[in-house]
Image: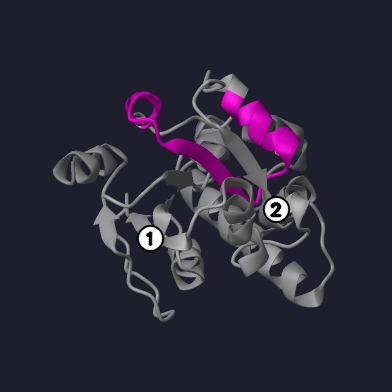
Amino acid sequence: MKKIKVIIFDAYGTLFDVNSAAEKCKEKIGDKWENFANYWRTTQLEYTWLRSLMKRHKDFWQVTEDSLDKSLLAFKIDPRMRSELLNLYKILNTFPEVKEVLKNLKEKKYKISILSNGTPDLLDGLVKSNNLEKMFDDIFSVEEVGIYKPDAKVYDMPIKKYEVAKNEVAFLSANTWDVSGAGNFGFNSIWVNRNKNIFDKLDYIPHNEINNLNELLKLIYKNE
């Protein structure tokens, strides 16, 4: 961490809880709400990768709608819930520690950014709905390059903007494929393993594994 000048966060699953939309509807959805939320998320990611491979790009909001439509059918959920779930997806909750950690990082004078599959409008909306407007120097969206993570063009955006070396960037994600994508690109990738998952076999081992973002602060203080 001594060399780090820029700290970049993935958005979905790292800062913002992707299951919080379905959780707010759990009384209507019933006991299957969590399985439904995970299925929606998995389908959403699969569609980003497939569209990148097919070179048939749709923005993240369209992918989110398409993956929700499939998920509603798969779990036999009333299609009239579609609008409610989509509206809730625009205002996902942060994880509990996020705001305080970001405040601490700003005091340390790092460049702080988001690098996400989300559209600029979606990301701006999430930041505003969680009162995080002053926390980030930049919000990078894949829409600038027209292809999804883990394509190298995505990870190269902050390098071009900040004119830093790849090893001067710490990248944090809860998504193992994203950690590997950024790590193989050359970032110092940190895995935010909130759910005690198993890391993928994708030719990269993260420099650090943490259980939540509070542990990022411990890494920084340790190296001061």
Per the rendering, the mark at residue 47 is none
User: Is 52 one of the magenta-colored residues?
Assistant: no
The answer to whether any part of residue 41 appears in the image is yes
Q: Which residues are magenta?
A: 98-127
Element carrying mark 1: strand
Residue 187's quadrant in the figure? bottom left
The image position of residue 138, as x and y in percent, is: 60, 36
For the point 25% across and 38% down, the residue is 217
Task: Give me the disc on residue 188.
Answer: 1
Q: In the rendered view, does 219 fall on the left or right side of 114? A: left
Residue name at image x 76 percent, y 68 percent: 51
**Picture coordinates of residue 134 (x, y %)?**
53, 20
Q: Is residue 110 left or right of residue 69?
A: left
Residue occupying image coordinates x 74% and y 62%: 147
Q: Which residue is mark 2?
A: 142
* Crowdedness near tag 2: few (<14), some (14–19) or many (≥20) residues, C-alpha within 10 Å: many
- Binning the other alpha carbons within 10 Å of mark 1 as few (below 14), some (14 to 19) or many (20 upward) gives many
Give the mark count: 2
Main secondary structure type of the part rendered in magenta: helix
Query: Considering depth in this image, is 193 or 84 the residue closer to the camera?
Result: 193
Q: Is residue 215 left or right of residue 63?
A: left
Q: Residue furthest left?
A: 222
